Amino acid sequence: MKGFAHFLAGLTTATFVVVIANAFYGHNMIANAIIQNKELIIILGGIFGILPDTIDFRFAKYLQKHDYEVDMDEWNIDPQRVADTLAKAINQAHDENREVNVMLHTIKISSDQWRQYNVRFDTENNKVVCEIGPIISGFEKRPYINTYLPEDKAYAEAEFKPKLNYGYDAVTHVDILSGPDFSFFPEKDGSVRADFIPWHRRWGHSITMGVLFAPIGFMLYGFTPLGWTAFWIIMLGYWSHILTDHFGLMGSNMFPPFTTRRVPGFKVTRSMSTLANIYTNYTNIMLMIFNMNAWSPVLYFKMPWATMLGLTRSNFVEWYIVSLLNYIVYYILPPILVSYFVVAYIRKRKGIEELSDKEARTREQMEEVSGVNV
Amino acid sequence: MMLSYILMAILFVLIGTLIGSMLSMLPGLHVYNVIGFFLLFYFTMGLVIDPMLMVLMLIGMLVSYAFVFTISSIYFSAPDDSTMFILMPTQRYLKERKGHEAVVLIATGALVGVMAITIFVPIFMNVLGIVWDIAMPNIHWIIGAVIAYMLLSEFPKDFGRHKNALHGLKEAWKTILAGYLTFFLAGLLGVILYSKTIIPANHAFQSLMAPLIGLFATSSIILNLISKYEIPEQNIPKSVDAQPNDITHGAVAGSLGGLFAAFIPAVTAGVGGYMASHAFAQKGDKSFLVSMGASRVVYYVGAIALFFLPTLHLRRGALAMGINLFFTPETVGQFYLVDAGIALAGIVSFFIVLYLSKFLARVIPKINPKLLNIVVLGIIIVLVYIMTSWQGLIIMSVATAIGLVPVLFNSRRSHCLAVILVPIWLNMSGIALAPYLGLW
């Protein structure tokens, strides 16, 4: 998801923690601290909700070591070097039985122009292919059609020995901002596994880090009801990021240092999918409104199911659960379902096909490069 | 309602739209500054104008400003707090001879934004009232969350070439820390200006003019003056290459961002639009430009619609506060009259923008850009001096220095909005910094 969705998910999680803490401590204690004493405790949810990406894109990215870097400029373009370096790294990972990392830098022309190049892993014929593309402009990547190189200068390939497990789309574009880096890992069966941006969604995107950050709540508020509430807001806010990311394809490494690999995601959507982001944000905003109403001294709206069952806020848990279910059925699900089916119908009429697993995974990974997601 | 009154109402909307369009061409001049003078004139002259007609004229001015200021932002590179977000893509468009195309996209977004206000605000009248009641007691943490997001969502803009990890971190954090420094300095300036009236008391209603112009307009002009800034010949295409998807996506995102900004104190159109562009996972310049046009209009004009909304009467923005000095909205009929006035002014402003943009696209490349920037800077200095006296010029100079930090270090200029966000957030959270700064 985009950083904004994570931030909102963290805030929403915080509002749920406040509702539960209110029920636990009674007397609307935590909500009163927020409304009357102007406590800012809910913001912690947003901050820790976006923190995993902050850690990765502001720190982990720079701590990643590369065995090889390919850095070309417009006057020194050499596709053979790109292909050879990648093939060499794959062989080395296999021969030396260790992880080998390669960074492919972008070719910057001016403040807003780059030359694009593509890398393709031909796993059937054990070949890496590099093709130099046109100069492109801006984030929309508009190509200047008169800037293609002649084929003999634009194409190169190199062979590698081991079997390569490459779970992505065949072609990787290297174009704007910072380029992608690849990691090649030796597998037990003798093959080599390739991964994009190895520094992302590792230790920073883990359940473990959420647990480690949670005690900050006590540092801020002591071992008081607010301190415990902050503890849970921080931990669950952090985990909300890991969970929402897990609906994509890339997944995260959940329990470092005990685990070292990313667990693949649920494959429900792609992190940059417009609809997925809109639905997540809409749901989060609606849930926050519901929770703020639930802890407000005056109820500004009531849900009919709770009224029909004769439930009031004095039976808080039952009233809350029934009202929430009613709210989801009336106000959250209908617009999401209607828009989803409308979009699906339009896509079908236009003949737009769903991406394959490989294509979707590549698309998601490329969108994550350079932090475009955040 | 009598036909003659309706015709008078239309006339006053059109007069306001024309006055607003002419004045909005002046770089750096905010419509709120002009409206302040109009109100002074109205009160002191004791003019016998029906208050509702006066309101409609002011709304015409506001709507036309929301549309026409795009022109001076793009062709004169003198943005305000809401157009500075579109400065980068529009400068790119200008460089690629597509300045007029950028204007058309922004104006299209603005027109859709006007339609969104006039159609959806009445439909969701009751919902907006309930949401406001629920949000109001929580507004301190909502603004705090906006600030936290602004600070946490700035990511390094490096190109990945580093000697080692330490060098990489240094390069990455240079822009981030420059952004934080900007936020801190702009916030401090805001706290000082909100706590102490520095400009003369008779100009106090213009207190934000000097800092906002300094932070956004003069810093951009100075950058233009010290860099190689050229405006090539502009193309004026008969149609603009944009997919319906770009327009829809941008317009919906921008309208919701603008509504959020109109709703929440201290949040401006730029911040609202930028958050909405993240919320809607926007891709591409076209959708972004449309969204910024919509966000800007919905922010400025939506604030007035919310003021007249029978279930809300929310006073947000200088115009609502100014109108409230002589007029209290009471009836649903007044709301619908304002709604119709907004729609009329929006449609007229849309065509005015297109015409003016075509004219300027032909003329601007023939003008020496350095000279143009010097003239614009001169106009701004004179305006600030007239409206806020020499004290305003000093504030503008300080704000310009702060505004140059993100420009020179390539960090987000949105951090300059701390000048509004921080003091209002502190106020809403019940925190007074002024005593610690020796201001009280």
Image (tube, rainbow, N blue to C red):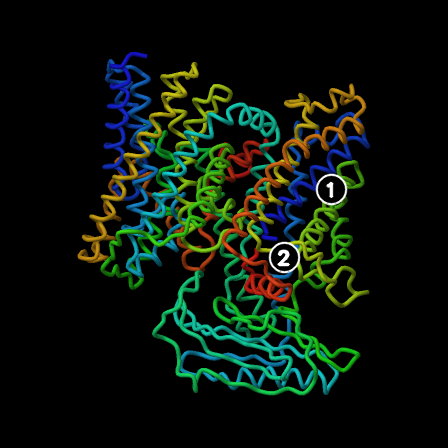
Chain hosting mark 2: A
Name the one closer to the observer, B170 or B347. B347
Q: Nearer the viewer, mark 2 or mark 1?
A: 2
Residue type indicated by callout 1: Ala
State which quadrant residue A101 falls in.
bottom right
Which residue is at the front of the view, A142 or B57?
A: A142
The residue lying at 52 percent from left, 48 percent from top is: A346
- CB under 8 Å between discs 2 and 1: no
Label 1 resides on the chain identified as A
Q: What residue type is labelled 2?
A: Asp
Give the labeled residue for mark 1.
A230
- Indicate left or right for A261 with B334 as reference: right
Q: Is residue B368 visible?
A: yes
Residue found farthest to the top: B2
Instruction: Name the quarter where the N terminus of chain B is drawn.
Output: top left
Task: Give the CA distance from mark 2 to mark 1.
Answer: 21 Å
Residue A365 spot, x, y in % from top left: 60, 64
